[in-house]
Amino acid sequence: MDRTGIKQFIAKRVAAELHDGDVVNLGIGLPTMVPQFLPENIHVTLQSENGILGTASVDEWTHNPLHIVDAGGAPSAVAAGGSFIDSATSFAMIRGGHVDATILGGLEVDEDGSLSNWIIPGKKMPGMGGAMDLLVGAKNVIIAMEHTAKGNPKILKQCRLPYTAVKCVDKIITEMAVIEVTENGLLLTEYNPEFTIEQIQEATEATLSISPDLKPMC
């Protein structure tokens, strides 16, 4: 697969997971690309944990875009009908289970659905953000990431980096596959036809079970 199209491919597939009316929190990086791939009949409310309910891209709303930033510090905007809320209210929404889905990137995910994505020891970090709260508070946790890093698996038997939260992930979507986290481990439900099932397993340290309803990614 052409590397320039990997992130777009992942973001487009993730967009198919969202439903009309969902309240959705997006992590920084790749997850912010998801809204541009939503079908015309699907409208979601984007929540930013720094206190915006109804975020919009600066392409949509260009008035004073630098006066508003998202939780990652990037220029953002507020859609018509959106609002600003204080941090306590924002995290009450998250911790109270009022966020339908959160889409986050990942450094490592393991076969128990635990996630490491907030720090690499010895490297500078901007802060843990709201990921820990989102992972335990959102109704649906989707990890959108590349399948490997420099050829090394990112889907492991057990995370090696410090955990962000444990047993929290519902689904992993990469350029190679869609994988559901179940009580019995990781279930491969969709595959990218550019890769064989054997290649997907070779790129995955954790053992994958194959769904009887396995289908190509679209």
Image (cartoon, rainbow, N blue to C red):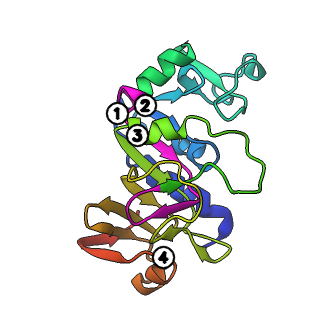
Which residue is painted at 71% across and 57% down in the image? Answer: 121
On residue 136, which mark appears? 3
Q: CA distance from mark 3 to mark 2?
A: 21 Å
Q: Nearer the viewer, mark 3 or mark 1?
A: 3
Q: CA distance from mark 4 to mark 2?
A: 32 Å
SS at badge 1:
loop
Label 2: few (<14), some or many (≥20) within 10 Å? some
Q: Would residue 117 be seen by someone viewing this image from the given angle?
A: yes
Q: Is residue 82 magenta?
A: no
Q: What are the residue bounds of the magenta stretch?
A: 95-114
Q: Which residue is mark 1?
A: 20
Which residue is painted at 44% across and 84% down in the image? Answer: 196
Name the image quarter holding residue 2: bottom right
The tag earlier along the polypeptide, 2 or 1, is 1
On residue 204, which mark appears? 4
The tag earlier along the polypeptide, 1 or 4, is 1
